[in-house]
């Protein structure tokens, strides 16, 4: 889809946790928003984030390519097939509540896409690894999130090779649904078993490189942080807690009235 | 067995988990500092297993069971395999970071790491690749990076399983020459390879295995027979 | 310890499971099958290692799938991966993967569970609009008068029934074909 692009924007220069915190906060906040106006603010926030990352043009195209089909389906599902009352919109009769629902849901997806695609475009994987190392995030978490992405292209190439090789041996990819399901075995088994056979070498290599040393890894080039960025990240946390506290309060009433009163 | 030996095996046998046959049978040998020991044998004769046991990787990481005596005084073994792509951490976007990964994991200070990495990249002739993504390198380039990463750990015991498999003849000669230099610095080097002729040129000793048993332990010329 | 996993080998297996989840879609697409097999890696890790490792594989897969596709709105479906991980680990423990005739029905049941977990997420968080194919089915069902929650549930479960049945069948075959020197190190593969 899209990947990191070098740049000099504030987001590029920021500590990697900062744009991640903003995008994650936005993800949590959009699900707390219930009205088109509130959702509109968050969509705008996503767009502003992309501008802050000098990536609006780069991010807008894939974001809209992913969002528009969903928006259309939402319009059909909720707008056209939604409940009464309806009003005329040109040749169409659109459900009032359904249209509102479609706007809220579609806006959610759009805001999330703009925010996270901006993070992808502005947060360098190297800087993220260094930031995680410096903050003593466990090796396992870093390894799973980052290292897997380097294994995927290699496995994809091997999958393509296996596909070609099996076709040369007479495997047919077409035919009845059952025939196509049966074709999965000769394609999937060699791929998975071959990868399983390499596990030991990867384990040995990592062990040799000291991941089991028990020591705190030296971060070679940790990204700089600042009090202002810490503040921004904490503000994000507070906004999320505040927004969801408002939504959760009525539920507390259902659980126990004293809890509800205590939280007022 | 010499007290100063980095690795000592006494009538050692090793079996992998679930196997009824011994991968190593009744092996008695030692490896000293400063030696380059060539390990030769047909595929399946136990050469790779010998490296894994010598480095205390087996049975610890790959399972199996040892019978007989094994003493390892090497505190920093380092191992290199023939397939470089399985030895990448996958966490590093530059060759420099890949080679620095090991020393960084041992919590060495940054300046020391930079010096170590720079030195090994130069010795392996890959300093010009230091900013390249390891995933974009050829097999030969990547293998030299992996060897550099192993040496950057400042091992006292270096184990190599067919390290020149991806290298052209000139690069292979250079690598084996480097192994001899590394041994001269006090490192014990154990190299398993089917390229017996090349290995014999730099080795001070050769061990030949057949069906897990040592059939020769002595002059490198014995491995050529 | 890494992320609470017991060993470095478990961690590397989890990584492999994640990669399998992310790559198999390509194989499936070549066969034009209406499934994703995007949890086969999770199920395999559950069988070989256990539930915690499988949960790690599932959640990581969800995050990385979002990174690779750009569609971060699918992140909440990580809950489905947790359900798959726990179920598959339990199934492995009781020996379901020893035979195809137990693996396939167990996969069918997981399809119901997974689809049943995905449906409320799709309905409450996304109004029924998620992945293209599933949403198209939802829309078609809505157009013939099916209530939206029912349409979302049917669409979610429909693809998941086939997907998880096939995934369980394939994991059964994979485990049967693991070489003996590797199999000896996994309790579930004790022969």
Image: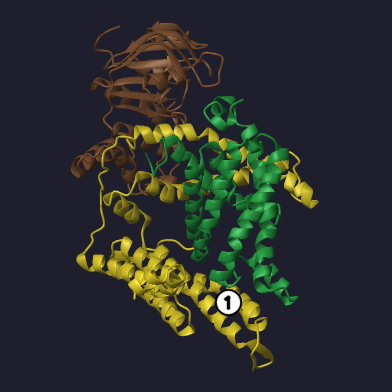
Residue at x-position 52% and y-position 28%: C185
The image position of residue B53, as x and y in percent, is 40, 19
Disc 1: which residue? A71
Front residue of A73 and A12? A73
Residue at x-position 39% and y-position 12%: B206
Residue at x-position 64% and y-position 70%: C149
The image position of residue B38, as x and y in percent, is 39, 16
Chain B, which colour? brown
Q: Is residue A169 left or right of residue A250?
A: right
Front residue of A77 and A260? A260
- The chain that hosts pointer 1 is A
Residue A240 can be seen in this image = yes
- Check the image and report above or below for B187 versus C19: above
The image position of residue B63, as x and y in percent, is 46, 24
Chain A, which colour? yellow
Residue C30 can be seen in this image = no
Q: Quarter-wise, where is residue A18 in the image?
A: bottom left
Secondary structure at numbered mark 1 = helix
Chain C, which colour? green
The image position of residue A210, as x and y in percent, is 32, 35
Rendered-image quadrant of the N terminus of chain C: top left
- Check the image and report above or below for C176 versus A262: above
| Label 1 environment density (alpha carbons within 10 Å; few <14, some 14–19, many ≥20) | many
Give the farthest residue toward the right. A176
Q: Quarter-wise, where is residue C113 in the image?
A: bottom right
Q: Quarter-wise, where is residue A158 in the image?
A: top right
């Amino acid at each position: 889809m899209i990947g990191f692009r070098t740049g000099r924007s504030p987001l590029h220069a920021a500590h990697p946790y900062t744009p991640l915190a903003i995008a994650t906060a936005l993800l949590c906040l959009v699900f707390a928003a219930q009205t088109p106006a509130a959702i509109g603010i968050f969509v705008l926030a996503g767009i502003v984030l992309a501008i802050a990352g000098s990536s609006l043009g780069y991010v807008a195209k894939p974001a809209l390519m992913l969002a528009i089909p969903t928006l259309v389906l939402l319009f059909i599902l909720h707008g056209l097939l939604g409940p009464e009352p309806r009003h005329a919109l040109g040749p169409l009769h659109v459900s009032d509540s359904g249209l509102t629902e479609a706007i809220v849901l579609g806006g959610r997806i759009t805001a999330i896409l703009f925010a996270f695609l901006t993070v992808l475009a502005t947060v360098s994987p190297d800087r993220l690894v260094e930031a995680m190392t410096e903050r003593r995030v466990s090796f396992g978490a870093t390894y799973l999130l980052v290292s897997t992405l380097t294994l995927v292209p290699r496995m994809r190439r091997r999958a393509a090779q296996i596909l070609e090789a099996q076709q040369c041996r007479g495997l047919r990819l077409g035919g009845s649904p059952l025939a196509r399901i049966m074709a999965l075995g000769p394609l999937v088994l060699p791929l998975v078993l071959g990868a399983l056979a390499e596990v030991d070498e990867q384990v040995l290599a990592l062990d040799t490189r000291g991941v089991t040393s028990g020591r705190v890894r030296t971060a070679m080039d940790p990204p700089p942080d600042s009090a202002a960025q810490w503040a921004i990240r904490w503000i994000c946390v507070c906004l999320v807690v505040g927004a969801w506290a408002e939504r959760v309060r009525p539920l507390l009433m259902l659980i126990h009235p004293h809890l509800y009163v205590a939280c007022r | 067995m010499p007290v100063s030996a980095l690795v000592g095996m006494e009538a050692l046998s090793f079996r992998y988990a679930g196997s009824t046959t011994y991968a190593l049978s009744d092996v008695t040998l030692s490896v000293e500092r400063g030696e380059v020991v060539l390990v030769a044998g047909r595929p399946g004769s136990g050469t790779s297993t010998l490296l894994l046991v010598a480095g205390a990787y087996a049975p610890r990481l790959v399972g199996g069971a040892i019978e007989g005596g094994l003493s390892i005084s090497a505190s920093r073994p380092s191992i290199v395999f023939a397939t470089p792509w399985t030895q990448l951490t996958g966490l590093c976007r530059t060759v420099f970071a890949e080679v620095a990964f090991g020393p960084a994991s041992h919590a060495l200070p940054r300046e020391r790491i930079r010096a170590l990495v720079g030195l090994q990249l130069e010795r392996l002739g890959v300093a010009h690749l230091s900013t390249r993504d390891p995933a974009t390198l050829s097999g030969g380039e990547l293998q030299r990076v992996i060897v550099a990463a192993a040496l950057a750990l400042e091992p006292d015991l270096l184990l190599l399983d067919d390290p020149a498999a991806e290298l052209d003849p000139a690069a292979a000669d250079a690598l084996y020459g480097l192994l001899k230099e590394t041994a001269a610095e006090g490192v014990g080097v154990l190299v398993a390879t089917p390229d017996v002729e090349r290995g014999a040129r730099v080795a001070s000793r050769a061990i030949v295995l057949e069906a897990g048993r040592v059939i020769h332990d002595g002059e490198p010329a014995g491995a050529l027979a | 310890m890494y992320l609470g996993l017991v060993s470095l080998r478990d961690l590397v297996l989890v990584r492999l499971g994640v990669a399998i989840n992310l790559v198999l879609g390509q194989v499936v697409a070549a066969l034009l099958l209406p499934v994703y097999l995007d949890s086969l890696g999770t199920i395999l890790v559950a069988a070989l290692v256990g539930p915690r490792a499988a949960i790690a594989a599932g959640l990581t897969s969800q995050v990385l799938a979002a990174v690779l596709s750009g569609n971060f709105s699918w992140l909440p479906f990580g809950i489905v991966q947790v359900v798959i991980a726990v179920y598959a680990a339990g199934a492995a423990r009781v020996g379901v993967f020893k035979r195809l005739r137990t693996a396939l029905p167990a996969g069918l049941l997981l399809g119901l569970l997974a689809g049943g977990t995905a449906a409320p997420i799709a309905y409450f968080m996304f109004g029924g609009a998620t992945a293209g194919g599933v949403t198209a089915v939802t829309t078609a069902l809505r157009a013939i008068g099916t209530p939206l929650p029912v349409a979302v549930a049917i669409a979610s479960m429909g693809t998941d029934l086939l997907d998880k049945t096939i995934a369980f069948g394939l994991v059964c075959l994979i485990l049967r074909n693991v070489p003996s020197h590797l199999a000896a190190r996994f309790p579930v593969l004790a022969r």
